Amino acid sequence: MNGRRSLRSRLTLLVAAAVALAIAVCAMLCWFVVRAELLRQVERSLEGRPQGIEWIGPYCPGGPRGVGGPGDRGEAAGRRPLPRLPPIQLVYADGGRCVAGSTPVEVTPADVALTHGPPGGRLLRNGVTDAGEEVRVMTKNIRPGLAVMESRSLDEVYATLTALAWILAGVTALGVLGAASAGLLVSRTALRPVGRLTEAVEYVARTEDLDTRIPVEGTDEIARLGVSFNAMTTALAGSRERQRRLIADAGHELRTPLTSLRTNIDLLLRSENAGRPLDAAPKRRLLANLKAQFEEMSTLVGDLLQLSRSEDEHEPHVEVAFHDAVEAAVRRARLRAPDTSIEVGLSPWYLRGDQAALERAVVNLLDNAVKFSADRPEPVVVRLRDGELTVRDHGPGIPGEELPYVFDRFWRSSSARSMPGSGLGLAIVAKAVRDAGGEVNLENAAGGGILARVRLPGSPTRSLLTPGT
């Protein structure tokens, strides 16, 4: 049943139940406090010397002397009228009693036992009269073998407590109704921002409009929820925009090699179908072009897959000897460009990261440097010192206004658009370095060319490297 209730009804019920419980507890405490106070008043009236005890002597044998003595009961009765005595009676050691007042109270064994004790002993208890009326009784030992009992009726106390119970029950009922009304008002007020958030979420789910924003008021939990929702939609909108740009850019980049492949294949098929096959040399050149275009497409697809991974989809980070990764990258670059001189100077550096990704990042930096140094006599200079890797070429450099965009996907400098490449190499470098906790930047070197700097956290000594660094 609770699972089908709305949040508003559950909150209203919770508030009403909490307030009703608090009122009920307070009412019960009030009833018990009043009951205890009324009983204390009754007990205080029983404290001290029993009222009218001086009149008992003439009417009860063995009683204390008052006006007249124990032996002149008849004389006292004849000479004096019987006064209106309070509910009082004597208890004898044999269990007998003499009722002097108007309310005879049943004698219990505890009362009889008190007569055998020392004078001054007393007993306070609840008792009943011969008519069955509940009374509060005080029994006092006034001398050996004799005790006096005085009682007070509890009917007025119980009547007062009953009336008080009905009053408190009415107050509790009114409190429950008020609590339910207050709970409904509180739930409506408190859940109004949640309602706006729900409407916004439903609107986004229905229209996929990620530009929707929720007005945020205050700094409470609901406001934080609104801020979080706005941040989430902003992140989703940015992710969708990046995905759209990636797809558009990938389609644009793939269009050229696909068109070239289709043209070359059509030419090859047309020559074969026309019965005029190409000569061996042109055919080899055509097949070599096809192979190069396929390799370019494979590289482009691999780069796209690498960049499409999220930040937490990399390989587990392990201890990496970065200088070894740089040396391996240099060997690969020399195989690709045997005519280009590469000058290397490396010092040990250990870090935690993805070795394959870092090696590929260095290869991409070297490929860029080699590409722009192919017809230059100066070597490509590679240095690794204190965790900073620098790669310097002596090419044409990059215009200053284009430097902020060098790590964007598919961005290519105006001086490099006629050269092979997809424009994804430096984006891959930036992602690999960022995943390893480092930073990378490109700048125009003094004397021409580009200087790439990669800074990675780590240690020159393997034993100083600790997990998580």
Image (cartoon, helix red, strand yellow):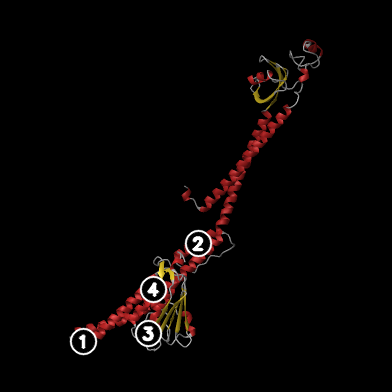
- Distance from the alpha carbon under mark 2 to that under mark 3: 64 Å
Q: Which mark is residue 341?
A: 3
Q: What secondary structure is marked by label 1?
A: helix
Residue toward you, 426 or 438: 438
Tell which of 141 and 158 is nearer to you. 141
- Residue 121 appearing in the image: yes
Q: Which mark is residue 199?
A: 2
Which residue occupies 30% across, 81% down? Answer: 292
Q: Which residue type carries mark 2?
A: Glu
- The CA distance from mark 1 to mark 2 is 70 Å
Which label's residue is closer to the chain start, 1 or 2? Answer: 2
Left or right: residue 44 versus residue 11 is right
Label at residue 404: none
Which residue is disc 4 drawn over? 324
First in sequence: mark 2 vs mark 4: 2
- Please report whichever mark, 4 or 3, sits nearer to the chain's N-terminal start: 4
Which residue type does callout 1 highlight? Ala
User: Which disc number belongs to residue 280?
Assistant: 1
Horizontal side, residue 262 vs residue 450: left or right: left
Q: Quadrant of residue 429?
A: bottom left
User: Crowdedness of circle 3 by 10 Å Cα count: few (<14), some, many (20+)?
Assistant: some
